[in-house]
Image (tube, rainbow, N blue to C red):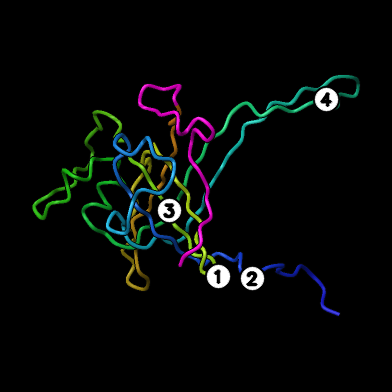
Amino acid sequence: MPAGSVTKNTANLIIGEGELRVGASASNIGNSGEVLTSSDGLGAMKNIVFNDEATWVDHESGYPAMDDISRRVGTKANITGNLEELSRKNLALAKGLDWTSYAALSGEIPIGQASTAPFYVRTELLFTLADNAQAVIIFPRALFTNNIALNFANDSWSGVPVTIKAFRADSKITDGHGSWDLYPLGRFMYRKVA
């Protein structure tokens, strides 16, 4: 008899890459569903890690001290991964810059220049599941917040490493919208592909 863990439903397995779509945050903030299309895509993204981090505070009492209660007091969300293509748009976004200024053929990407203001974007990351459904992670208001480290090794393909950090998008902030009041940092959705 086989031992060990067994996959319960192979239809729920995630294939190892996703498509990252990026668009303007402000003009799309009122829509809590998917709004970006494949034309907003940055190409394939590999080595993806989605983090939904909770901050908990514990209360202890007695001797010896034992936990009485734990409360979730904070949350953060981010996505890390590698964009396969080293385009001007991808590199500008990875540095947290407004990609529309650097996407032209004559564009240059500054090194060592301090950012004057945060450039918030909307990101939609699509994963394909084994049953041809897709999982979509939407950050309605996000920043690319990473340090660039490009590996030009000749024995493997390189990529543009990115970290995408979700920021609050609900109606409690100036640039937010009520459509995000139930999920202020974003949504994880499933959808069936026709």
Q: How far apart are marks 3 and 4 (CA)?
A: 39 Å
Q: How far apart are marks 4 and 2 (CA)?
A: 40 Å
Please, is residue 135 above or below residue 1 in the view? above
Q: In the image, what residue type sits under mark 4? A: Asp
Q: Which residue is at the front of the view, 29 or 143?
A: 29
Q: Marks 1 and 2: CB-CB under 8 Å?
A: yes
Q: Is mark 2 on a helix, strand or loop?
A: helix
Q: Return the x and y of residue 123 as percentages of the image width and height.
A: 38, 46
Residue at horizontal 12%, vertical 52%?
104
Q: What stretch is highlighted in magenta?
A: 171-194
Mark 1, Cα crowd under 10 Å, few <14 / some 14-19 / many 20+, is some
Q: Distance between the residues labelled 3 and 1?
A: 17 Å
Residue at horizontal 32%, vertical 59%?
38
Mark 2, Cα crowd under 10 Å, few <14 / some 14-19 / many 20+, is few
Q: Which numbered marker is on residue 130?
A: 1
Q: What element carries label 3?
A: strand
Tell me: 69 left or right of 184. right
Q: Residue at label 3?
A: 125
Q: What element carries label 1?
A: loop
Q: Residue at label 2?
A: 10
Dot placed on the residue nearer the N-terminal end, 1 or 2: 2
Dot placed on the residue nearer the N-terminal end, 4 or 2: 2
Dot placed on the residue nearer the N-terminal end, 3 or 2: 2
